[in-house]
Structure formats: structure tokens, C-alpha cells
Image: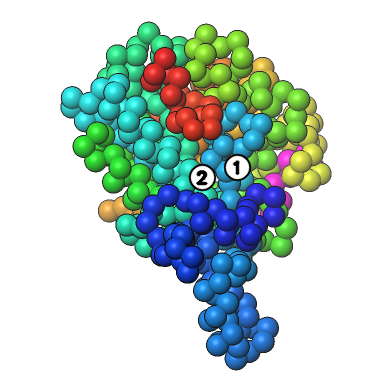
Amino acid sequence: MSKQQDATDTMQDDATRTGSGSPAADGTTLELSRRRLLGTVGAAGAAGLVVGGAGGALGASAAQADAPEALSTIGATEVPFRTKGAKHQAGITTPLQAAGHLVAFDLAPGAGRKEAAALVRRWSRTAKELMAGRTSQDDTGVALDAGPSSLTVTFGLGRTFFDRTGLTGRRPVQLDPLPAFSADALDPRRSEGDLWIQIGSDDALVAFHALRALQKEAAGTARLRWQMNGFNRTPGATTRPMTARNLMGQVDGTNNPKPSEPDFDRRIFVGADAAQEWMRGGSYAVVRRIRMLLDDWEKRSRTEQERVIGRRKDNGAPLTGGTETTPMQLDATGPDGLPVIPANAHARIAAPEANQGAALLRRPFSYHDGFRDDGAPDAGLLFVCWQADPLRAFTQIQRKLDRGDALSPFLRHEASGLYAVPPAPSDGDYVAQPLLEG
């Protein structure tokens, strides 16, 4: 596979990685990567299916430096910490993963620019190793028998980070606070933060392992502010690739801009003419914890639900017909003379053509945190969207939704955050190094 090293490269890398390991016969030191270890275990399972009782021979081959890997497709998929030729961090255009964590930290009292730089340097190094499927000798072992599993770790900086590090003069205007919206019921304890991390993986243990490793490395420098856990459909759970569904059962993300579109980079990533040079090639993430009033929603008939959204529930097609990707005919009317897609339908109000072309890249996780005192599920969407300028994308669209979206009565916005996500670092550098050392 193009996104992972082959078995030969892995064995060569094992012999050159730093850190303690097991001495080989020729006196060199080998360090088992998480992926390499899985290769020996996975090979055992695969061989058992093919040749039956070949345990003795397999046990010998597992100790050889050229033992083949036998990871499943999901486990073997590796997302590079920095993709050759790409400027942005992983986790923005990466396909949705099955498990995720969003976490924010505040710098500890007394920690400033120097301490923040050391922390982000440690985090960048750890993220690169974990995304490659490698772990240290003193690792907890949580993910030892798993491959990279599409792990991504994405780092962002909140508005207050610049105050605490003496860098207010280099804070982008795009980090100005979001305006208040009528549907907001925000908990400040679960909002904002100096530093933000998005973790995603197709294996829940791999995602947790990354969360735990990064949290431990923050000790003494930054304190946990808030943390949220999310999930999506597991890749391969459907007969063909499909747009994800949210907990309302709706296809969610149909109108996402596509990387193949000529203006994709302009909409999602900061341009080369940005005032803050250190953000060129980066993006801005808006994070919203949106609780869905599922008991109320599920009392509505499918027809009512479809009119609220403006799309069919079974396949995501607009109510004006066609397939999921068929453009909406916003001027189409029915026999009663009324718009087929209601004037307050969510899909109509959020459409780029209704917002002067404003578009953002939605990349959410669903969440479920048990049940509230009234028995209603505490569940909904960890909404994460990406754009080159939040004022011209999220804020513009949300203001319009706030004035008359038919979906709003079924939602409660309970937490919010806005973060500057710098571009991916150059080889050997760490995230935001030009800002912190410039």
C-alpha cells in the first residue's frame, strides 16, 4: 500500500531506530515497532487459516528479521505526520475515523513561551512516532498489538495561547471571538483553551493510547481544560463508501467541498498572502459540542424530518429528486405552489449558494455521554469544521441558521472553541516552530 512501509523497509527501520531494544545475534539492537509486533502476531493468525498446524515453523519465522506483516487493511493504514508535498497537518482532509478525542489544555501558571515550545516539540515528536505505529520501550502497552490504524493527531492554538506566551502581536485576526448565537447555551468550562488537540483513529484503543501519551507529556506544563470522546461508523461497515450519518439518522456532510475542486485550498487553507506568515498553509477549526434532542426528533414522522432537513433520509437526496449529489433545485415548487424544499429547511439555509458561496469542511464525530436526569440521551455531534477564515465561513453560515433554521429547535450548542491550526512542520521541526521561535 502506498501509505505504509513494506515489510522490508520496516525491518531496516527497526535496526536503526533509537532507544533500547533486544540484542540481535550480530550485536546490533532491534526495537520492535507496534506495527512490527503485530506483524508476528497477525502472521500467526493468517498462517493458521491457510496451513493449519504449522505452529513450529511459524514460531521460528516470527523471530526472523524478514517475517512478513499480516495486518488487516484497517490496522495497516498509516497517515503520515507530514505528507510529501502537502502543507497542512493530518486530520483535516483525512477520511473520517471510527474513534476520536478532542482535548484542550491551558498552560500552567508560570509557563510561558519557552515552556510552550518545549511541550509542542515533545507532542510533535510523539505524534509522529505514534502515527507511524511506533512506541517507546516504557510504553503502557495499550496499543501494542495494533497497527497505525489511520491515527492522526492535529494541533491547534487558542486565542488565549498568545496572551500567555507574550505573542499577542502575532495573533491572527481570524481568532477574534465568535459572536453569540441565540441557540448557544455554552459551558465555559468545556469551551476554548490555550492548546487544542484532535485525535482520530480507526481503532479506539489506538486513539486512547495517543490521548494518554500526550496528556502525560503535558504534565507540569499544561493542565487539562476539557476533553470529549467521539465516534463514527467503522470503515468497511457498509457495502460501499458512503457519507456518514449522524445520530439523527441523517446523511451528514453531503455538501462538503472536495479536494478535487479548484477552489478547495482557497476555502479551507490559509493563503500565501496571509498577514501572519507562520499560518500560511494552515487552517482554522471551529469546534462545537451540539446536543441533539433525540426524544423530540424521533417523535416526528420521517416526512416531517425530511422537510426539516430538506433531504431524504434513506439516501440523502434533495427533496427535489435525484441522488445524494444531485444539486438542490431551490426554486422548485409543488402543486400547492410552495417550495419543495421548505424555506427554513436546514440544507437550503446552509447551502453555499444561499451564503454568497461560503463553505466549510465538516469533519465531526458523534458522541454519547450516557443519559440525563430526565432520561434523555446526552448525545449529539462534536462538530468540527475547517476553513481559511471563520468569519467568512462558519460565522456567516451560523448567523443565517440562527435566524430561522427548522433544525434549531432540536439542537443545543453547549460548548465552543476556535483554534488556529498551523501548517505541518518541515522535516525535523515541530508544529508552530516559526511562531514560537521566530
Q: Is residue 15 left or right of residue 166?
A: right
Which numbered dot is residue 152? 2
Q: Nearer the viewer, residue 294 or 7?
A: 7
Q: Which amino acid type is marked by label 1? A: Thr
Q: Disc 1 or 2, which lies upstream in sequence?
A: 1
Q: Which image quarter holds the N terminus?
A: bottom right
In x, y percent, where is residue 381?
47, 44
As drawn, the residue found furthest toward the bottom would be 53
Q: Quadrant of residue 181?
A: top left
Q: Which residue is mark 1?
A: 94
Q: Main secondary structure of the magenta part?
A: loop
Q: Secondary structure at mark 2?
A: strand
Callout 1–callout 2 Cβ contact below 8 Å: yes
- Local packing at callout 1 (Cα closer than 10 Å; few below 14, some 14-19, many 20+) is some
Q: Look at the image and say whether residue 315 sits in the magenta stretch.
A: yes
- Local packing at callout 2 (Cα closer than 10 Å; few below 14, some 14-19, many 20+) is many
Q: Nearer the viewer, residue 237 or 25?
A: 25
What colour scheme governs how the chains and residues are painted in the rendered image of this protein?
A: rainbow
Residue at image location 50% in from the left, 48% down from the top:
131
Rendered position, 424 above or below 252: above
Q: Is residue 435 left or right of residue 277?
A: left
As drawn, the residue found furthest toward the front would be 26
Residue at image location 70% in from the left, 50% down from the top:
2
As drawn, the residue found furthest toward the left would be 109
Q: Which amino acid type is marked by label 2? A: Thr
